[in-house]
Structure formats: structure tokens, C-alpha cells
Image (cartoon, rainbow, N blue to C red):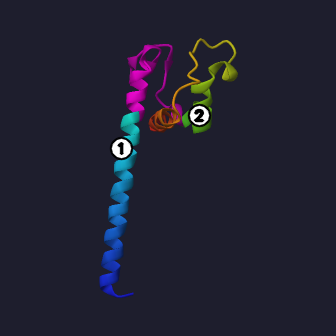
Amino acid sequence: MRPAMIVILGAALIVIGVGIALSLDDTLDHGQEVYAMQKCALCHSISGIGGKKMALDGVASRLKPDVIRKWIRNPKEMKTDTIMKPYPNLPEKDLNDLVTFLMTLR
């Protein structure tokens, strides 16, 4: 491969990588907004901020994304005596971005 071609391919990969990073930042920002809009902090805390019923610090180390999704959609299915409110009608994008945000809490 010629050096010019390598430079062009390298630049293209950098642009793609920056685009992915910006997209992930948007997703995380939106997930954090969903957390705030749905008032999750009334019951849950992150870094000591929010309700004391269940700290979400380290949740990504304890639960897989699909399990977090189930807790959000139908918590009674996960634990019958939970008092957590279900969010069955949360738009899919909101749910996906919220889960992505929660997966950063290691």
C-alpha cells in the first residue's frame, strides 16, 4: 500500500472514531437526561446524590444490560415485593440510552 493511501485510511479511521465518540457522548447525555426526567433520583442515588432506597453505584458491575432493562420495564417480574415503579411505556431510545448511561456506573 502506498504511503498516501495509508494516510487517507488513517484519517478516515480517525474521523469515524470521533463520530462514534460524539455519538456515545450524545447517548450518555440523553441517558442522564432520561434519569433526571423520570425522577429516578427520588429513590436511587449515584455518588451519594439522590434517594437512599437503592444506590446505583456499581450497578454495571452487578447487572448485565438486559437485566437492567427488565428492572426498568417490569420490576415486579424481577422481585415480586419491590416498590419500584415500572416504566413499560418508556420509549425504546430513552430506555436504551438510560441503560447505556447506567452501564457507565462501575
Q: Residue at x 56, y 25 (%)?
A: 89
Stretch in magenta: 31-60
The answer to whether residue 74 is above or below residue 96 is above
Q: CA distance from mark 2 to mark 1?
A: 22 Å
**In screen coordinates, is 15 left or right of 96?**
left
Residue 11 at x, y percent in the picture:
31, 70
Secondary structure state at the residue bearing disc 2: loop
Q: Residue at x 51, y 37 (%)?
A: 96
Residue 25 shows which numbered tag? Answer: 1
Residue 32 at x, y percent in the picture:
39, 31
Q: Would residue 49 be counted in the magenta stretch?
A: yes
* Residue type beneath disc 2: Leu
| Comes first in the chain, label 2 or label 1 | 1
The answer to whether residue 45 is above or below residue 21 is above
Instruction: Categorize mark 2 by other alpha carbons within 10 Å: few (<14), some (14-19), many (20+).
Output: few
Residue 69 at x, y percent in the picture:
58, 32
Q: Residue at x 47, y 33 (%)?
A: 94
